[in-house]
Image: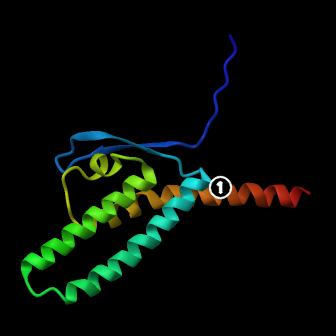
Amino acid sequence: MDSLQVRTGQVSLRILDDAGEERGIFRFNPEDVESAKRVLELQDELVQKSEAFKEANKNCKTADERIALLSETVNYFRGLIDNCFGEGTSDLVFGNAHTLSMFSDFIEGITPYYSQASAKRTAKYRKQTAEK
């Protein structure tokens, strides 16, 4: 029987915990334009919510208020990640961690894949246009 392999551009990254133990495999497709669109929207939302967090943090009077605000913000960000990449992604990637810095680490970690895919798409279309 003949077969056909379709290369979609999916990337698989091993997710390691702080001890270097594998937590699982995170899969995403930076060549998928809908995925790229969702990631750009995610980045914008993270920036906007971070600014809102900083502003709201100024109004917190107690440590309990700051912790509640931080918890709300982290849970919101985890939800954004799950909405973008699928339910359970934030648990896979972040485990039980609840820090703000982990989100920028995540975005910085996947951005090169999306940048490379975008450059590849752009080069392909430029070449096709130049040939015509």
Residue at 31% over, 64% down: 76
Q: Residue at horizontal 27%, vertical 48%?
A: 91
In the depicted structure, whether residue 92 falls above or below residue 116: above
* Amino acid marked by disc 1: Lys
Q: Which of 6 and 85 is in front in this view?
A: 85
Q: Quadrant of residue 83?
A: bottom left
Q: Could you tell whether 34 is left or right of 46 in the image?
A: right
Please identify the quadrant where the N terminus is shown: top right
Q: Is mark 1 on a helix, strand or loop?
A: helix
Q: Is residue 60 left or right of residue 124?
A: left
**Coloration mode:** rainbow
Taking the view exactly as shown, the residue that stands out farthest to the right is: 132
Q: In this view, does 124 lie to the left or right of 43?
A: right
- Can residue 100 be seen at all in this image of the molecule? no
At horizontal 7% and vertical 83% (from top left) the residue drawn is: 62
Quadrant of the rendered image containing residue 54: bottom left
Hey, which residue is sitting farthest top in the picture? 1
**Residue 28 on image: x %, y %:** 47, 47
Residue 113 image offset from top left, x and y in percent: 50, 55
Regarding residue 105, the answer to whether it shows in the image is yes
Q: Estimate the x, y position of residue 3 in percent, counting from the top left.
A: 67, 19
Q: In this view, does 53 lie above or below 101?
A: below
Q: Mark 1 points at which residue?
A: 120
Q: In which quarter of the image is residue 7?
A: top right
Residue 75: x and y, percent?
26, 62
Compared to residue 128, the image places residue 99 above or below, namely below
Q: Residues within 10 Å of mark 1 (few under 14, many from 20)?
A: few
